[in-house]
Image: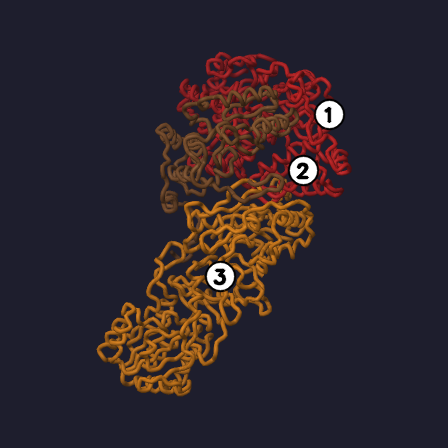
Amino acid sequence: MSEEVTLTIDGTEVTVPKGTKVIDAAKKLGKRIPHFCYHPGLPVDGNCRMCIADVRTWNARAEKHFPARRPAVTCWTDAEENMQVFTETDMVLKARASVMEFLLVNHPIDCPICDKAGECMLQDYYMRHDRKRSELRDEKVHKPRLVPFGERIVYNGERCILCSRCTRFTSHVTKTFDLGIVNRGDRAIVELTKTSKFDHAYTDNVADVCPVGALTKTDFRFKKRVWYLKHTESVCGGCSRNCNTVVDHDGQDIIRVMPRERAAINQHWMCNEGRDLYKTLQNVDRPAAPVVRVDGEATDPGWKAALALVGEKLAEQKKAGRMAGIASTWMSNEEALLFGDLLGKKLKCGRLDVKTDVADGYPADDLLHTDDHNPNRRGVAESGVVPGKKEGRDLAGILEDCAAGEVDVLVVWGPGLVNHWGGDAAAMGEALANVGFVVQATWKHDELSPLAHVVLPTRSWAEKSGTWTNVDGHQSQFRKALRIDRRVRDDFELLAQLTVASGIKKPVADSLKAARKKLKADAEEAAEVLDGDFSFPKNQTMYRHHGGVLEV
Amino acid sequence: MAVGTYPVVGEHLTILNYERGSESWPLASYESRGGYSVAKATLGGSYQPDDLLGEVKASGLRGRGGAGFPTGLKWSFLPPVDDSKPRQLVVNADESEPGTFKDRVIMEENPHMLLEGCVLSCYAIRSESTYIYIRGEYVPAIKRMTAAVEEAYAAGHLGENIYGSGFNCHVTVHSGAGAYICGEETGLIESLEGKKGQPRIKPPFPAVEGVFRYPTIVNNVESITAVVYIAHAGGQGYRAWGTEKSAGTKLYSVSGPVKRPGVYEVPMAYPFKDLLNNECGGMLDGVALKALIVGGSSVPVVNAETALKINMDYESCEEHGTLLGSGGVIVIGEGTCMVRSLMVLLRFYHHESCGQCTPCREGTGWIERICSRIENGHASDGDIDELYRIADSMELRTICTLADAAAWPTKSFIEVFRDEFEEHVKQGKCPHGNTFPDHLNLRGGGAPQRREDPEHAFIA
Amino acid sequence: MSTHQEIGGGDVDREAATLQYNPDPHDGIEFSDAAKQRLEWLRTRYPKDHQRALILPVLSMAQREFGWCSPKVVQYVASVIPVPVIQVEEVATFYTMYNKKPIGRWHLQVCHNLSCSLMGAEIVLEHIETKLDIHRGETTSDGQFTLMGAECLGSCGTAPMMQVNDHYHENLTLQDVDDLIDKLRAEPDLESDAPNLAFGCGSGPSRALPQDGPVLTSGQGVVVPGHGAH
């Protein structure tokens, strides 16, 4: 049990563990002390001077409070027993206004052309704490404005406030030592070291942590104004890390994906591959309506007929026992619950397992990358999609049985089955030729789709809500971001309908909430995920970034 | 009871205790002046470490680099000895405060006294390791200190088990590379650690967490050198000169249009007018005193009238609206443009700002630009108040005091010589023609009022 | 990666960091035996786990041996300590005395701070500018002289003065300046035959290494009003 201290901030007491900084103690009270260089995921630097407050320490011998010799910066000052902190006194307000003035004196009035407008800390604090006219009657200092740092990041020296967040990121988080601040005084600029191409997987985080528009991403430059973006909490499906993200979109297309803070998983960061993942949703060959193959010909009988057909086939197999179910590693836990319950429990199918939707990608590293490029392998298994206890067959066994002609009905969820034949579609076709009835529920066409007897269109991760469990067992929730036609059915809804169509009165859970309850989703984690800082008031269209911590 | 032997050259000359102009730096010369006898006696048992620390405290010695913090008190901030974090002594020889050149004299002419001071100070604070950080420009000083260190090691005054006392003392000379900010104690520590010399936020103070995160005492060259006399004569002995709050003697470096500029050691509380007229021989003929910067460019300027009332000690200077600082005495003569003088100083602070924190980085450049506009006649009425306001808003909001050091002269120049600033604005040009007076008549081919003894820079 | 592990923090494997991003450290640059010896001696003067402290002493030695801190020199210094290159780049650009580009054989640094200005530093500077036909900050076209205005050099009592490479020349008259420049121009060899490896970085000439490749980028394109390009 660590030591605790109690201090008073603007008259209100707060108790925090010893070693907590005053700025974090204030956050606990819901007070946000303005700052630039401070970042909860980076070591403290204390150079911007914006978080200055009137800090008075208790001197036990003199039995009174003494003010600090120089006004203290709350990001650096440790909270102490009986400390008194005032964040809104005259001295403090003057200090803040003065820091703002000095920051703006050489800052270019780039807002009309700067991507950061709308989520810029300098702008926000100006509106909140300053609003003074510029007193500058001299020329500003000029610095290079278009310096590429690798291919993904662009640096603008004039906008830079030299907070050193980006350099601290590359020296303390990635430990790649790419960026540094060169020169002295007001000649200082951030520079990319000569021996680095800045092409590692975490470069874009520096643009997230940059409080202003000095570091911008080439993927987002001049694309869209942030106040036209909608923001939805999501999770990255690039690998089993499940970094928590925010998807910025306009309802139809995703414009940008950024990390969202999750202490247990990705802190404040995500990798570049994850950021680019949304591009895999573009220009994709997707089924728009259910397809039923009759004598090799694709027909469009409509959902009712398709569901009835599949349900009939599944119901038959309850007695026959010649069926198999292959889940998708992109399924949510809730969907997996329904899938596993329907096939494994209700239809007594022992041939139940999950495939590898995505075969290859980057190797694991000691930051975020894992070597499993599938988001929810663990969650799907833990939600009940496992080979049956009696006469169970795992994936290898299922594929063997299919080739041997022992499977009459095969239900495959999601794309990527061909990975298990090394991508050889012909081999897969050969192996599945003996399967009587293949049903594929998928959000995009793949090599299996032309072979399937029924193809049911489902949704991509951006078009539905659900929970994934990452490699370490942490659960994360993603929410529906993009609009989609109802003919492309929500997976959870589809599974519930299939359950009913198979002759079972009720699915094991009829809502996501009920499913989570059934899964006994970790109460603490669920609370953090569902009720925490991460929900947006409906009318909010602008947000600020801490490189992952969203601040109102 | 005196410890060791100490030559008496001039009554108050505790540091410059040799014949100026003689070859005073080799070990042989120092030993012939009783050099290292104090260290030998101390390590031989005349003091225990805590006793010596007590004497330094009792002496009232205050940091001679500019801050004037009581040295003994600073030493007492060290936490209990922890072998995993060996204590370090760092000698601040980065002397870059404009107008200050006294440490250079100590290192070039009396380097062994500094080393003896290191041995004694290390003994008192229980440190076995000293770094002497010398500014990179001072190549002769670096050479002399390096040679002195080698001599001292060879003769057994440094190294392991000095004089058989069981005490080890190691000294490393470390050169800077040109940055005024490395004269700030935490900027120096950062530079010593191999980084840019960007100061650290205090607390924690270097005594608790300093170089390499070990407890560190950073002291000025003159402060450490003064420890030798304090160990010799005791804390009370040091108080033979000066006042209650400003004890001992101080080295002043005098520059400007005086007959004998140079480095002088005088007792604390010595009246400035005596320093000017006696030691320095008065102003150059035909040049009247206009202003005085008494402690290096960072202290407020005072006019002639005030200057002649000042005694060179901490209290008197404060009383008269300035600070004793580093003791870099810059004398300013009539005919000098004060706006141009300020512009030169602000150019310096702008050049030397480390750039780490916002108010100093942006502010020093901004106030230099405004002052420059005033000097060149491109300013308007509000600019003087604006200059004052901006300088004022830089104060106290930064990590270190460079911003304050830029703000104080700005504010004091405007306060004391506001009429000159207003003339520049009114006339739309510099009334002195954008130049400084040619006191030495350089344009006329030489210096008819050439200072006496031009060969020896620091003749007293 | 374990569950609640904090990303970042802790000590860094400098060697690994350097080798990964410094693939070609030497490229023709190597310390003399004397410098290598001194480097090994310097290692013993600083704690084993704080060898970053070697950056200034070693970069200073490198400037003595190679004349200026070119990008290759900087990378070489980073590789021998070893530390990440960016740390040496930061140091080389922060401190005034490290030459970021080659300079003339004689580096004339005239102090223009207050004490010297009061005694005629500006007159000396203007005189040299006229005599050499360059502005302060520039190098003569024959590569002999670079003229700079410098900040306080700690020689205020002997103003006006200038530092030329390692030496101070004090109490200058304009005649002294003329004589000195003529003498330097006629000087056949450089000041010292062996580089003064133990005496800091000096502000000396750029010998040995021709100007090859880009100069050490220390903010090319930074323009400070009233001071021109940095």
Up-down relation of residue B159 to residue A475 (above or below): above
Q: Is residue A465 above or below residue A20?
A: below
Dot 1, how many residues are within 10 Å of its Cα: few (below 14), some (14-19), or many (20+)? some
**Residue A315: % across, % down:** 33, 86
For residue A258, the mark is 3
x and y, in percent, of residue B300 in the image = 68, 32
Instruction: Kindly identify which chain the residue marked by label 1 belongs to.
Output: B
Q: Residue at x 60, y 69 (%)?
A: A539
Separation of residues labelled 3 and 1 (CA atoms): 65 Å
The percent position of residue B312, horizontal first and vertical second, equals 67, 24
Q: Given the image, on which type of amino acid does mark 3 rest?
A: Met
Q: Give the number of marks.
A: 3
- Label drawn at residue B334: 1
Judge whether residue A189 can be spotted in this image: yes
Label 2 residue SS: helix
Return the chain for callout 3. A
Foreground residue, A146 or B417? A146
- Say above or below: A137 vs B159: below
User: Which chain has been coloured orange in this picture?
Assistant: A
- The residue under the point 43% across, 58% down is A271
Q: Colour of chain C?
A: brown
Mark 2 lies on residue: B372
